Amino acid sequence: MKILAIDTGGDTCAVTLQINGKIAAEKIIQTQRDQAKILAPLTSELLSAQTLQVSDIDRFAIAIGPGSFTGLRVGLAFIRGLALASGKHTYGFDHFKIIAGALAAQQQPILIIRESKREDLFCAWLENGKLGDYFLSPAHGLIESLPKDKPFAITGNGAPMLTHINAALKNNMLDVSDSAFMQSLCELTQNETGDTSTPPQPLYLRNADVNIPKQVA
C-alpha cells in the first residue's frame, strides 16, 4: 500500500510517502506561512523522485489540527484535490491522536500541548494509551494544574511555552520528531477501516479571529 501524508497545520510543510509499511521518502520544511506556495511543488518533487504519479497512491492522509487556520485549509484543499483526481480516499487524524500514536510505547502520563498563537494552549492528556478530553488553558494555569505527586512528561510545539515560564519543566520534555509524527500519521491511515464517505474536516478548538465590518449607514 502506498500512502501519501501531509501536515500543514503547524510549524512545518511536511509530505511523507509510505510504501508497504515503510517510509520511502519525506520532505519536511520548517515554515508557518509558505505552505500554499511550496506544498504542490514539494509533493511533485517527492513523487517524481520515486517515479510515481498521484494515481499510484492508494490512500491519502492529512493532519487536521488543531493548528493554523490557514495552514490547515491549505493542506486539506490540496489533498482533497489529489484524492478527487485519483479517485482514492482521504483519511484525517487530529494532531493529538497522531502524537499519541508516536508515543504508544510510553508508560507515564503525557500532556500533549499545541500552540494556538494566543494565550490559550490546545491540550490533552495521554494516559495508559488513552487520550483524555481536549481542552484550552493559558500557560500559567496549565503549570499550576500539573501533577505534584507523580512523574509525567510534556510534549508538543506548545510545551516550550511552559518551560519558558518554569525552566525546571525542561526535565519533563519528551520530543516527538517531525519524522516520527509523519510516520504515525501514515500508520494510522494504513490501519484505518472506518467510513470514508465524509471528507476530513479541520479540527478547531477556538473560533477564528475575525473582525466583522461595521455597516455603513
Image: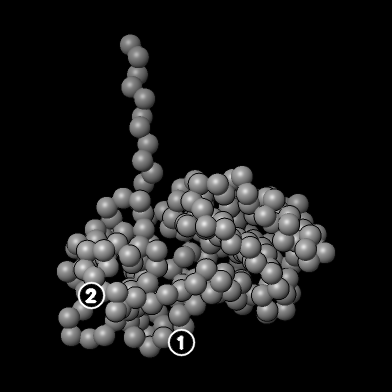
- Quadrant location of the N terminus in the rendered image: bottom right
**Residue 47: which quarter of the image?**
bottom right
| Residue at which label 2 appears | 168
Residue 87 visible from this viewpoint: no
Mark sitting earlier along the chain (1/2) = 1
Percent position (x, y) of residue 88? 73, 61
Which amino acid type is shown beneath numbered disc 1?
A: Ala
Q: Is residue 129 above or below residue 58?
A: below
Q: Residues within 10 Å of mark 2 (few under 14, many from 20)?
A: few
- Helix, strand or loop for disc 2: helix
Give left or right: position of 150 versus 5.
left
- Helix, strand or loop for disc 1: loop
Residue at point 47%, 57% (across, down):
10
Q: Which mark is residue 105?
A: 1
Which amino acid type is shown beneath numbered disc 2?
A: Ala
Q: Which mark is residue 71?
A: none
